[in-house]
Image (cartoon, grey):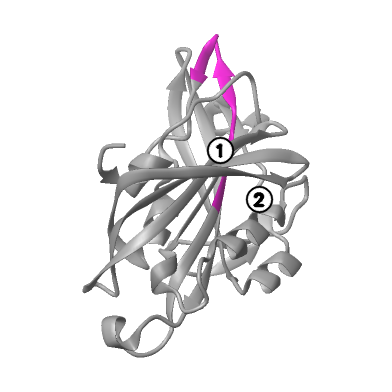
Amino acid sequence: MNRRLFIGVLGVGAFGTVAGCLSSGADDRPTFSATPARVSEEAAGEAGYGYQGTRELTEGAQVGGQDIEVTSYTSVYDRGIELSAERFGAGAVKAGVFGVTSLPQVTVGGEEYDPVGDRSTRFLAERVQSHYAGIEVDRALGGRALQALGQRFSFQAYEGTATLRGEYDVRVRIDLTQRDHEDDHLVVAAVYPVAELLPGGSEQGRIDILTRGLEQYDGISVDIVDQDGSTGDT
């Protein structure tokens, strides 16, 4: 795999047929909205990851010659990890990051709209890069499969380089999977230091717990995080 920014990895994939929750938006534009996804409190607690809230993103697009609005959601979790003080400075750093983005599948006028593009996944990438800067992928690793939401999620793993705390170069592992669930498309991604840098070994087991604990259903409660950091339940 060629070197590329992490957001480029998130941008792969395509969509299928009609989708999402359809309503009427501004100026009678059709509005397609995903259902938020998150990790159960039990699974997050077992993995030791803290919920950092859910970002809501509504974007306009033109599909099939018609203006539409598409709303997606990104829920982010992170974990403080004690790394080598000699190499990375004293104290735990939030070096484990897990995110799940839900996006509606959309087809209008026979044309498909793919919201798994750069702009629709930017919040997940930005939250990851608030911990790590300049993530680049330089090789693909093996994959693995997990059961979540009653389905099989096939992860692809990558290894790359990033900057931690704005000054430390660190080798990281990136786990990525995409899967349709109900009328939505899910993108699940995790970034964490490679096993050689972790005092307890690989972080993969914790990521697997988070993945198996995924929840997505009508009426699910999430804490919406605004640009200014304020929150509100939905």
Q: Does residue 14 appear anywhere in the picture? A: yes
**103 in the magenta segment:** yes
Task: Report the predominant secondary structure element of the magenta stretch.
Answer: strand
| Viewer-proximal residue among 97 and 76 | 97
The residue most toward the top is 110
Q: Which residue is mark 1?
A: 178
The residue at 58%/33% (across/down) is 25
Segment colored magenta:
100-112
**50 in the magenta segment:** no
Q: Which residue is mark 2?
A: 37
Report helix, strand or loop for mark 1: strand
The residue at 42%/33% (across/down) is 12
User: Where residue 108 appears, x then y in whole percent?
Assistant: 55, 16
User: Where residue 28 appears, x then y in whole percent?
Assistant: 57, 26
Q: In the rendering, which numbered label is found on residue 110?
A: none
User: Where residue 138 appears, x then y in whole percent?
Assistant: 28, 46
Q: Which sits earlier in the primary sequence, circle 2 or circle 1?
A: 2
| Viewer-proximal residue among 229 and 143 | 143
Asked which quadrant contains residue 182, the reply is top right
